Image (cartoon, helix red, strand yellow):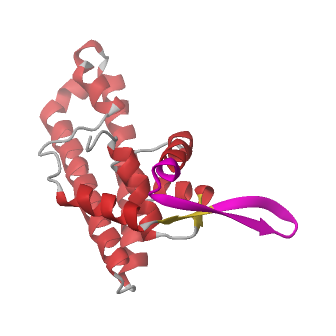
Amino acid sequence: MVAGFPESTYAVLGLIDKLPDSSGYELASVASGSFAHFWPISQTLLYRELKRLADLGWVVATRVERAGAPLKWTYQTTPAGQKALDDWLARPAPARSSFRSGFLLRFFFAYRMQPGQVRALLEDYRGAMQSLCDEFEAVIDKLEASATPQARAGRLTALHGLRTAEARLAWTDEVKVLLGENLS
């Protein structure tokens, strides 16, 4: 937490700065396909943060009338919001961060499982990690053609995700070998 606000506040502020004039729905969609891999944020939380940011004067909301479609609001950072974002980015990031993994939590207690359950757990995880690799590769390919600083940062972040997922795949294969016959 920085300056009394949770990291999610700055995540949404940065997203608005990166994608000005986007609606809450559009921001939620981009968040779910990008930084949600390492900083999950629900649509409900995103909308709460939009209100907080507007109340702080860090973003302005603009009402957009659309013929034959519901009203929508779009958001843009203010100079005060850009300064708050710059101040947050200038602070050191936590040296360690954690993530939650239902898989690892279950695997920690695998001694209570039958070998077939452990094998199925590992196979499900391996499949999920392979899908994640495919997803990150598609993002990297999509962003590779763009030379904008935003695309470059997104591509390099996706590359981190890809390498992490590849390491988890390798770990899964190593564990299967180490457990060997215990999975039979």
Magenta stretch: includes residue 66: yes
- Split into 4 quadrants, where in the image is the C terminus? top left
* Residue sitting at x 14%, y 53%: 92
Residue 167: percent from the left, percent from the top?
A: 20, 52
Magenta stretch: includes residue 123: no
Q: Which residues are magenta?
A: 53-73
Q: Is residue 106 visible?
A: yes
* Residue sitting at x 35%, y 40%: 125
Residue placed furthest toward the right: 68
Judge by depth and name the residue closer to the eye, 120 or 27.
Answer: 27
Judge by depth and name the residue closer to the eye, 134 or 41.
Answer: 41
* Residue sitting at x 52%, y 52%: 54
Q: Quadrant of residue 151?
A: bottom left
Q: Quadrant of residue 122?
A: top left
Residue 9: percent from the left, percent from the top?
A: 40, 47
Position of residue 176 relative to residue 183, above or below, is below
Residue 28: percent from the left, percent from the top?
A: 54, 54
Position of residue 157 relative to residue 110, above or below, is below
- Split into 4 quadrants, where in the image is the N terminus? top left
Using residue 102 as the reference point, say whether residue 71 is left or right of it: right
Mostly what secondary structure, the magenta segment?
strand
* Residue sitting at x 31%, y 24%: 106
Q: Is residue 184 visible?
A: no
Residue 58: percent from the left, percent from the top?
A: 44, 57
Position of residue 48 relative to residue 54, above or below, is above
Residue placed furthest toward the top: 112
Judge by depth and name the residue closer to the eye, 161 or 1.
Answer: 1
Q: Quadrant of residue 90?
A: bottom left
